[in-house]
Image (cartoon, grey):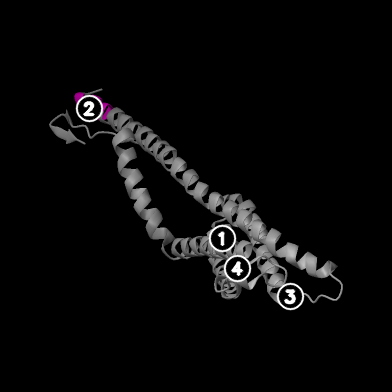
């Protein structure tokens, strides 16, 4: 073997080491990026679950008030069912079912991106409109009504006036989830891209391999 052969063997060994170092660096970078982005995506789900829980809770409270009036009318002989109470119970019931299903369906996004619940923002905005109608109906009845005028169809004016504001809270909660879903659906890739850039810079500093320059028989190796 001549000197040239030893030089070739040495270069081959150095190239192999360089490839191994590059592979090891990429593995560390990928693991670091996943570790950095996983908590962000997990925390992103927390506000969604909180909003769904509030939607379910406030709708249940409204059902309790309006459902009581429906039950009283049902048990009162000769009394007619008031459509406003029935409509309020219907919207509240639909909201409870929707909030529960959307909260439980959240983990399905792991299976497919098409199953992400924020893509159903049309349902959220529909319920927002339904709650606005509820607020308009009962707001028109009780917000303008004074306590001196007495009860309305057996319902306390002062009590129902507070329930009216719960209707508005319900509407705003569904508006928040609907707008979030619309923005996330339309601009989701851009938002995720910005997040990936930020986490990429952080993880590259933590796990990235610094460039090394070495001399190998007069050649610079990067």
Query: In this figure, which residue is indicated by the disc labeled 4?
Result: 147
Give the mark nearer the N terminus: 1 vs 4: 1
Q: Earlier in the sequence, mark 3 or mark 4?
A: 3
Dot 2: within a 10 Å radius of its alpha carbon, few (fewer than 14), some, or many (20 or more) residues? few
Find disc 2 in the rendering and name its residue. Answer: 7
Which class describes the residues within 10 Å of circle 4: few (<14), some (14-19), or many (20+)?
few
Q: CA distance from mark 1 to mark 2?
A: 56 Å
The secondary structure that most of the magenta stretch takes on is: helix
Whether 177 is among the magenta residues is: no
Mark 1 or 2: in front is 1
Q: Quadrant of the N terminus?
A: top left
Q: Residue at x 32, y 29 (%)?
A: 17
Per the image, the residue denoted by label 3 is 82
- Percent position (x, y) of residue 190? 38, 59
Q: Is residue 158 left or right of residue 77?
A: left
Secondary structure under tag 4 reads helix
Q: Residue furthest left?
A: 218
Please rate how many residues cluster around mark 1, counting C-alpha atoms within 10 Å: few if below 14, some from 14 to 19, many from 20.
few
Which label number is shown at residue 114? 1
Q: Nearer the viewer, mark 3 or mark 4?
A: 4
Crowding near pointer 3: few (<14 within 10 Å), some, many (20+)?
few
Q: Earlier in the sequence, mark 1 or mark 2?
A: 2
Label 3: element kind? loop
Q: How many marks?
A: 4
Magenta residues, start to end:
3-10
Give residue 78's position: percent from left, percent from top.
85, 76
Please say whether residue 6 is one of the residues in the magenta stretch: yes
The answer to whether residue 161 is left or right of residue 19 is right
Q: How far apart are labels 1 and 4 at the CA level?
A: 52 Å
Rounded to the nearest whole Å, what is the CA distance between mark 3 and mark 1? 41 Å
Residues 137 and 125: in front is 137
């Amino acid at each position: 073997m001549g000197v040239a052969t030893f030089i070739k063997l040495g270069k081959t060994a150095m190239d192999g080491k360089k490839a191994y170092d590059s592979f090891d660096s990429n593995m560390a970078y990928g693991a670091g990026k996943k570790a950095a982005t996983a908590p962000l995506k997990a925390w992103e789900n927390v506000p969604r679950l909180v909003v769904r829980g509030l939607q379910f809770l406030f709708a249940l409270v409204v059902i309790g008030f309006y459902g009581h009036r429906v039950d009283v009318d049902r048990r009162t002989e000769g009394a007619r069912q008031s459509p406003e109470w029935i409509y309020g119970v219907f919207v509240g019931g639909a909201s409870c079912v929707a909030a529960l299903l959307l909260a439980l369906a959240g983990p399905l996004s792991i299976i497919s991106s098409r199953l992400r619940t924020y893509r159903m923002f049309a349902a959220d905005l529909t319920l927002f409109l339904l709650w606005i109608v509820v607020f308009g109906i009962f707001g028109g009845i009780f917000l303008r009504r004074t306590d001196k005028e007495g009860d309305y169809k057996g319902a306390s004016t002062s009590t129902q006036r507070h329930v009216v504001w719960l209707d508005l809270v319900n509407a705003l909660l569904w508006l928040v989830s609907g707008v979030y879903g619309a923005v996330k659906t339309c601009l989701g890739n851009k938002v995720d891209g910005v997040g990936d850039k930020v986490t990429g810079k952080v993880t590259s500093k933590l796990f990235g391999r610094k460039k090394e320059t070495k001399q190998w028989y007069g050649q610079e190796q990067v």
